[in-house]
Amino acid sequence: MNKLSSLILFFLSSFFLQAQEAQWTFSYERTSDTEVEIVMNISVPEQFHMYSFDQGPGGPLAAEVTFDYPDVVQTKGGLQYDTEPREFFDDIFKTTIRDFEGDFVWRQKFSVPADEEVTITGAYTYQLCKDNGVCVNPFPEKFSVTIPPLQQKQASKESNNTHKATIDSNTKTVENKSKTDSELNTSASETVDNQVEKKETVVANEREADVEKTSDYESETQTPWWIFIAGFLGGLLAFLTPCVFPMVPMTVSLFIKKERKIGIRDAIIYGLSIIIIYVGLGLAITALFGETALYEMSVNPLFNMLFFIIFVVFAISFFGAFDINLPSSWVNKMDKKVDSSSGLLSVFFMAFTLVLVSFSCTAMIIGTLLVESVHTGSVLGPFMGMLGFSVALALPFTFFAIFPSLLHSLPKSGGWLNTIKVLLGFVELALALKFISMADLAAGWGILPRDLFIAIWIVIVVMAGLYILGKIKFAHDNDLSYVSIPRLLFATALFSFALYLLPGMWGAPLKPLSGYLPPMNTQTFDLYTPTLRSGGISQAVDDYEGTKKYAESLDCPLGLNCFFDYEEGLAYAQKVGKPVLLDFTGKTCANCRDIELNVW
């Protein structure tokens, strides 16, 4: 088991996704008294490429730059580039691709008043992809370029021969040397005109981009904090396990024997050391993860099956079949460090000893937390998860060391600690199903339909409720002479949740859990879905002549008829005079299932 635990830790420390973004800097160049160019210097990360703004329809997501400007300003032509994009036929999209790599420059000409300061604002969106098909979609960003009046520019040119353009993209200021008209004409040669858009359309697009950015930003900023909260709750649960809770009186007694001020200082250092050790683990994982490993592993069937096996092993360990321990030599060496060290270093090694000794209970919680961070796709996941976990674990030790009189209010160690540990085993079993479900969906095996998934969850929840009431016992459990009020209330909550899940076996939506359950199209017995559709909602496609592309491997939400190829669906919509609704989804995308179930 020592080798297994080391292997698990090594495996969990092999994934990470480093966020990739192109660097955009905006400036202006005045080509005449009444004409300027907004210059976009763009740098794409190594191994990635960005699709051109003139990428044709039916392919990947083209970059888009929208402008907003006062009435005295007018565009002159379309967006241009200094260097031709790479052009090739893509076998995946079945269309011609135009993209850029490395560093390149885009330009947009405007006519402006010579004697008036104007500000041109806008937004840009783009997609970055690798040749292996892995793509990232950074958030839309805004920019702002202020162009001073010509007289102000001339005065500045005489004094310093430079001018500044204030950029409101990542709060940067870009300085450019003024160029002569002949130099600008040379640098702007060999450009390609794009289709000119009306100002009204551009403004509307910008407002749409603002809405999209706000939504995406709120979602992304919530993710690391949700991981922190999950880590904090995991730390509280770890504190209540048999490996940690009994160590509180023993550890605190070491601090209260010292002088009051020194004891408080050492207690604070002890808590900070616990945080540093666990956060260091999160940072180490951050350093070891590859650029796109997080996404690739989270959708890989084999790795999801491995996650499933790991969680089952964790559950069996929580049930008491065996303990996952670190080598005893590690703990002995750390004890010697405590004895041979002095002062604050000794306190740090005491904290390290706690981490090692409690590993048999905390390893499964930490492993669960790290695996979940893989599936959130958050770059800060390991760091925020370990920060929340360590803060929750360190606070009680520090608190009781500062206020030792409150130790008497703690409940005595006993069988209730093992009960919490076993309940965590049931939680691990329930979470394990999520990963085998994702592997099933990604590989298309069809071994775990939605109703079977719910049935297993119901059994797990009922067994946990019976265990709380003492109807199921494990080898390390004490005899339960009576049922306490907390046990009764907790068992009631578990049985109520099982009853809530029960209609889901026959197709009830269970919307709060839609992101965790398999999609509705895997449901075997479905008595609810027909009531969610009005009559004839999908009849328009029933008379489609021919076989729809990819229909053999893809399904529509809630049994609706739809197309899986954009060009094929668009052609049919034009034929029958119907509007087109696009559903961007993925087989293992929990958010997609949540949105589809609620929107459809």
Image (tube, rainbow, N blue to C red):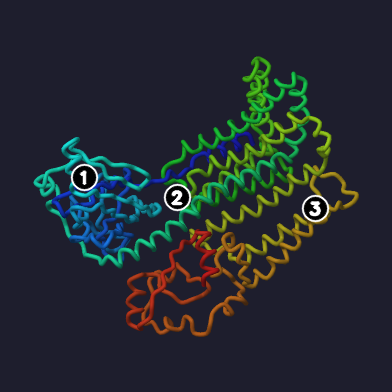
Residue at far right of view: 481
Residue depth check, mark 2 versus mark 1: number of the one nearer the observer: 1
Q: What residue does disc 2 label?
A: 296
Q: Assess disc 1: are there few (<14), some (14-19) or many (≥20) residues with their C-alpha within 10 Å of its C-alpha.
A: some
Q: What residue does disc 1 label?
A: 152
Q: What residue does disc 3 label?
A: 468
Badge 3 or badge 2: first in the primary sequence: 2
Q: Are marks 2 and 1 in contact (CB under 8 Å)?
A: no
Left or right: where 445 falls relative to 199: right
| In the depicted structure, whether residue 13 falls above or below residue 67 | above
Circle 3: residue type: Ile
Q: Residue at x 67, y 64 (%)?
A: 455
Badge 2 or badge 1: first in the primary sequence: 1
Query: In x, y percent, where is residue 206?
Result: 35, 61
Query: In x, y percent, where is residue 423?
Result: 73, 49
Badge 3 or badge 1: first in the primary sequence: 1
Query: What is the distance, in whole Å, between disc 2 and disc 1 at their CAs?
Result: 54 Å
Query: In x, y percent, where is residue 542?
Result: 43, 83
Circle 1: residue type: Gln
Q: Secondary structure at mark 2?
A: helix
Q: Assess disc 2: are there few (<14), some (14-19) or many (≥20) residues with their C-alpha within 10 Å of its C-alpha.
A: some
| In the depicted structure, whether residue 371 falls above or below residue 454 | above
Left or right: where 526 falls relative to 53: right
Q: Image quarter for residue 253?
A: top right
Query: What is the distance, in whole Å, between disc 3 and disc 2 at their CAs?
Result: 39 Å
Circle 2: residue type: Glu
Q: Secondary structure at mark 3?
A: helix
